[in-house]
Image: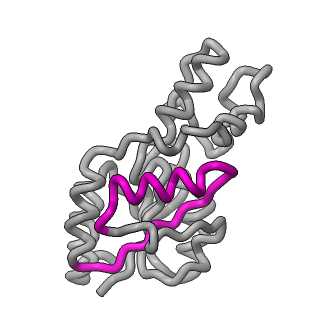
Amino acid sequence: MITLLIDMDSVICDLMSEWHRRYNEEYDDNLSAEDLDCWQSEKYVKTECGTKIYDFLDESGLFIRLEPLPNAIEVLRRLSERHDILIVTSSRTYAYTEKEKWVEKHLPFIGARNLIFTHRKDMVRGDILFDDAPHNLIAFEESGRKAVAMDYRYNRNVDVERVQNWLEFEQWVEKYEMGEQS
């Protein structure tokens, strides 16, 4: 049985759309994830915003309102029948409680007992990490395990396996199980 470590933000749920919507409303801009060539969002916002872009991540209600990415719930349900699944996510302020409630609502078959909050995902025991953050993908691969990127423009400089969506990830895991992925 494979242990899958799955990130939440921008992998299971759509953080970027809600985060950027809040920024765009306040700063009269049109930022989207497709605009980001790197992980540092402050490089893509208006000067008067700068690093305050991250303050939106501290707003109450942000994480509880996030929508699941297409097919995430269904694929996770199928994968959970054959594998151990741990949700690994980092968090700021309110997000601990909101993320736990989100998992209980949308992923009751995984449950909050399988939710791990950490900034060091490479330190969590598991076989495969499915993530979007370049630093997590790199550190996990450097630990000698397999990282798979949810493909976004901002993580394309990282040399790891990548998928475009949850259905592709499910197929990738099936091939990995059969020894077709290295």
Q: Going by the image, does 175 lie left or right of 115?
A: left
- Whether residue 96 is in magenta: the answer is yes
Does residue 133 lie above or below 77 as drawn? above
Report whether residue 45 is seen. Answer: yes
User: Which quadrant is home to the C terminus?
Assistant: bottom left
Which residue occupies 66% across, 29% down? Answer: 44
Looking at the picture, how far across and down is residue 73, in whole percent? 28, 55
Which residue occupies 62% across, 25% down? Answer: 23
Magenta extent: 82-109
Does residue 96 lie above or below 139 as drawn? above
Question: Could you say which is closer to the camera, residue 61 or residue 172?
Answer: 61
Residue 14, quarter of picture: top left
Does residue 22 lie above or below 67 as drawn? above
Q: Going by the image, does 14 lie left or right of 144?
A: left
Q: Residue furthest top?
A: 28
Question: Could you say which is closer to the camera, residue 118 or residue 97?
Answer: 97
Question: Could you say which is closer to the camera, residue 50 or residue 34?
Answer: 50
Looking at the picture, how far across and down is residue 174, in whole percent? 21, 73
Q: Residue furthest bottom?
A: 1
Which residue occupies 55% across, 29% down? Answer: 20
Looking at the picture, how far across and down is residue 38, in whole percent? 61, 43
Question: Could you say which is closer to the camera, residue 175 or residue 25?
Answer: 25
Does residue 1 lie above or below 28 as drawn? below
Looking at the picture, how far across and down is residue 24, in whole percent? 58, 20
Residue 91, quarter of picture: bottom right
Which residue occupies 24% across, 64% down? Answer: 77
Report whether residue 129 is seen. Answer: no
- Whether residue 50 is in magenta: the answer is no
User: Which quadrant is home to the N terminus?
Assistant: bottom left
Residue 109, quarter of picture: bottom left
Q: How many marks?
A: 0
